[in-house]
Image (cartoon, rainbow, N blue to C red):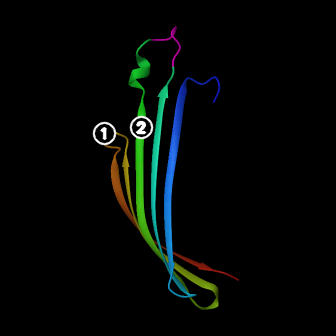
Amino acid sequence: EDDVPYTDESNLYFVNLTHRFSDRMSLEAFMRHVVTSGRFVLSSRETAGIDSLSSLKSREAETGVGLTIKGSEGVEFNPTIAYRRYDDETEDRYDGEAVSVFMMVSKRW
């Protein structure tokens, strides 16, 4: 962006594999990795040295598997389990990991 005192960049990498057992059931595995970095870019007339304190780089990774089961009358079941890890490369309490399990049920007409 023009006329803003920072630069930032994000890169997203994603891999998705699906195996179809039959017309009614498939298995999906996925991996996602995001790297984000940003920093202030100050002009020489502003406070010197503050830009060296403002760098940020974060990484987020997610891995998971899901199953798709097509039932009768347009009903579909999608159980999924995923593991996510977040790290902003600073020693603080905002880094962490989580496991999520969820079930989505949908109906098509």
Q: Residue at x 46, y 36 (%)?
A: 37
Q: Tell me the quadrant of the picture where the N terminus can be found.
A: top right
Q: Position of residue 98 (x, y in %)?
A: 36, 58
Q: Residue at x 42, y 29 (%)?
A: 55
Disc on the earlier residue, 1 or 2: 2
Which residue is label 1 attached to? 92
What span is in magenta? 42-47
Q: Considering depth in this image, is 109 or 29 the residue closer to the camera?
A: 29
Q: Residue at x 50, y 58 (%)?
A: 14
Q: Tell me the quadrant of the picture where the C terminus can be found.
A: bottom right
- For residue 40, the mark is none
Check whether the beta carbons of the residues at disc 1 and disc 2 lie within 8 A of each other: no
Q: Residue at x 41, y 37 (%)?
A: 57
Left or right: 27 as drawn, with respect to 73: left
Which residue is at the far bottom?
Answer: 72
Which residue is label 2 attached to? 57
Q: Position of residue 95 (x, y in %)?
A: 34, 46
Relative to 29, is 38 above or below?
above
Q: Position of residue 36 (x, y in %)?
A: 47, 41
